[in-house]
Amino acid sequence: MIETKKELDNYIIADYVMNRGYTHPSFIVWIKQILFPDYLMQYLVSMRKFSFYSKKCGLRNKILSLYYQRKFLRLGLKLGYSIDPYVLGYGCVIPHHGTIVVGGGIL
């Protein structure tokens, strides 16, 4: 579970490295992402941010949690993913679009 903002940033950077091979997009990649959105990385980032903000207290965090939850669920429907936001670890790799179901186990 993601506890701090720095840990959240590290999770997102690790996801970028494992899925795209870079930590921060170059200017050309940034322009390509505007023209052709990278829904997979948007999904992973919104999943990480939703899991982070949903465990925090305060009105700002609750609003951000609702925003990222909506974005996470909308992109999940578009991509065909049904993934529990709390089960995937550091540097998750999702190799394809299509039906992927990953659930949390019951303790």
Image (cartoon, grey):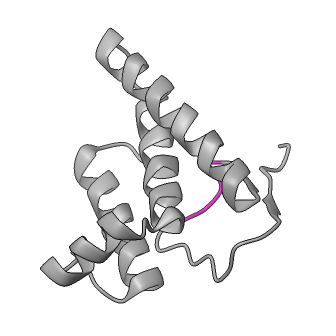
| First to last magenta residue range | 85-89
Residue 76: x and y in percent read 67, 51
Where residue 32 sits, quadrant-wise, is: bottom left
Residue 1 visible somewhere in the drawing: no
Q: Is residue 47 left or right of residue 63?
A: right
The rendered magenta stretch, by its main secondary structure, is classed as: loop
Q: Residue at coordinates 29% horizontally, 44% vertically from top-left?
A: 4
In the image, taking residue 33 as reference, residue 52 lies left or right, namely: right
Does the segment drawn in magenta span residue 88? yes
Which of 4 and 100 lies nearest the eye of the viewer? 100
Q: Position of residue 98 (x, y in %)?
A: 78, 70
Which residue is rendered at x = 52% and y = 40% of the image?
A: 71
Residue 97 falls inside the magenta stretch? no
Q: Is residue 18 above or below residue 43?
A: below
Question: Which residue extends farthest left?
Answer: 27
What residue appears at the point 43 percent right and 72 percent down from the top-left corner? 15
